[in-house]
Amino acid sequence: MIRDTYAEEIAGLLARYPDKKSAVLPLMHLAQEEYGYMSYEAMREVAELLNLDPTHILSLAGFYSLYYEEPTGTYVLEICNDLACALRGADEFVEMATGKLNIPVEGTTSDGLFTIKTVMCLGACDRAPMLQCNLKFEENLDEAKFDELLARLRAESAGNVRPSSVVERINAFARQTE
Amino acid sequence: MAHILLRHREIPDLEKLDVYLANGGYDGLKKALSMSPEEVISVVRSANLRGRGGAGFPAGIKWGFIPKTDGPKYILINTDESETGTFKDRELVERNPHQVIEGAIIAAYAVGAELIFNYFRGEYMDAGYAFEQALRDCYAQGLLGQDILGSGFCCDFYCHYGAGAYICGEETALINSLAGELGQPWSKPPFPAVEGLYGKPTVVNNTETMANVPPILVNGGEWYTSMGVEGSPGVKIVCMSGHVEKPGNYEVEWGVTYRELIEMAGGMRGGRAFKALLPSGGSGPVVTAEALAAPLSYPGLPPYGSVMGSASVIVMDETTDMVWAAYKMIHFFRHESCGKCTPCREGTYWMEQVLDRIYHGRGTAADIAVLEDVATQMKGKCLCALGEFAVSPVLSTIAHFLDEYKAKVSLSAKAELIEEAVLATA
């Protein structure tokens, strides 16, 4: 229950908006952090916190691309292969990355560690090829740097380090009101 | 010339409040607070500061539309930067956040707003995280909150994060998104200045627009209009991407030519020949070499059939398949169409389907006409600019590179003939 896990953050978020309905996107970010994706349970919880109909949360989850409607790997590698990045080799990079992990785009590795998605412009066209891994930008990539990234994430996960997440970032801004 | 917006290029650690203050930071705000709100608006109006998100509407006039009544009013900064090829606002919020904050507080004072939100696209959460630190420092120094710098003016400032939707850069969609609704635009009127966030008067300004405000307050409107060209005064950050040696942000005075911009970005990558460029990300028609002589300004590109927009210049060399480029852009617009109005929702879908056929060698000559027809039918019928933007890569590539389209469909025609011949002999 995010009501319990993130009680402090939720209170901070609700306090900053003249209308608490405005907190729905940040609360959905928190719920996704808790459940790994926007499960029905997660949606119902957000809806209850804001007195909204759960179908409203469902429509938002479908509308915004950062909410996942299916479970993902621990690390979601979202590679931009939009025009500006593709002019600098992003499509070839996607092919290399999916080949290396032996999964299709939108696929997850069998160890549950990595999901690869292709996404629209992330605003880092000058540092293509690039991707965001759980919202953290990795830029100026090539095969060697991708190998390094995978090795780093595998080591992190073996050491039980929690992946870089939205929570600490949401935390920081929820607490600002204090 | 020293940078006016990308000042962090000369001043290390400018994102820190003490460094910003030591370099004239918040002098614009101090000056504004010593003036009346009307005087502040008139200074910004005299500078003819035009909106940097792409539409180019004068900020001073926009602020002037806010009614002088009591009651809540809001300032929203648009950091939803999602146009393909655009990455200027991210550099500003990460490296020179205080100039954006200062501009927004001045705007709030000018229109009598007591609450500012900076709407970041969800993917910029890391940039927002750093920006939050700058806000906390401001609160600690009395630059935000109650009685700012002893002036009696009170103002709060929060960050808000979207969750991945290009359309939320459209001001009414941004307002809906911030209100917890689907990020879909509404048909104006009502304009946000009258009925915006929570139905209250609201100013929505682009991040780069806000960063221009403090130096204008300090140096005056005349100083600002002494830079640039007639109708397009001041400085602009241009995002150079694609086939150039040194992609990145370049701050320039308006009036430089597109040829000079490419030279600034290190020239064409690998010394290859220039073929075409998209001057405003995916949202403006593609132009060819003749347009390289055009100046960066609002009237500069229309003679070449295009627009300056947010000045996100995607450069393409001789190796670029223009049907592929059009397909990439339409894929983007189909994905980002919010689905509210039929011409855009259906039009982008069908344009992608037809382009997919043509690009993958399954198209016929009739498909080119169908594509052109769908695009033409969409024009002028969409609820917001997204749908209008979506037709430009299609119509402009057909206009300039019809041969490439024809080659693709004739190849598929040949393949069909061969297939038929093979079947006949089998």
Image (tube, coloured by chain):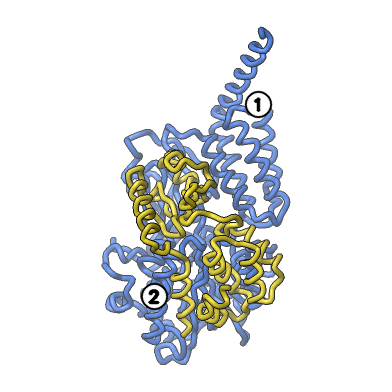
Chain colours: A yellow, B blue
Q: Chain of mark 1?
A: B
Callout 2 amino acid: Gln
Q: Few, some or many C-alpha atoms within 10 Å of disc 1 (few <14, some 14-19, many ≥20)?
A: some
Q: Nearer the viewer, mark 2 or mark 1?
A: 2
Residue at 64%, 19% in the rendered image? B416
Q: What SS does tag 1 mark?
A: helix
How dense is the environment of label 2, judged by Cα within 10 Å: few (below 14), some, or many (20 and up)?
some
Answer above or below: position of A113 versus A87: below
The picture quadrant where one finds residue B170 is bottom right
The amino acid beneath tag 1 is Ala
Q: Are marks 2 and 1 on the same chain?
A: yes
Residue B26 position by quadrant: bottom left
Residue B279 in view, yes or no:
no
First in residue order: circle 2 vs circle 1: 2
Residue B385: x and y, percent? 62, 55
Q: Which mark is residue B31?
A: none
- The picture places residue A157, in percent across and down from the top left corner, at 40, 58
Image position, residue B392 (x, y; %): 59, 44
Q: Could you tell me which residue is drawn at 68 percent across and 28 percent down?
A: B366
Quadrant placement of the N terminus of chain B: bottom left
Asked whether disc 2 touches disc 1, contact meaning CB atoms under 8 Å apart, the reply is no
Residue drawn at x 48%, y 88% is B153
Q: Position of residue B16 (x, y in %)?
A: 32, 74
Can residue B383 be seen here? The reply is yes
Name the element at disc 2.
helix
Disc 2: which residue: B133
**Disc 2 to disc 1, C-alpha distance:** 57 Å
Chain letter behind tag 2: B
Query: In the rendering, which numbered label is found on residue B365?
Result: 1
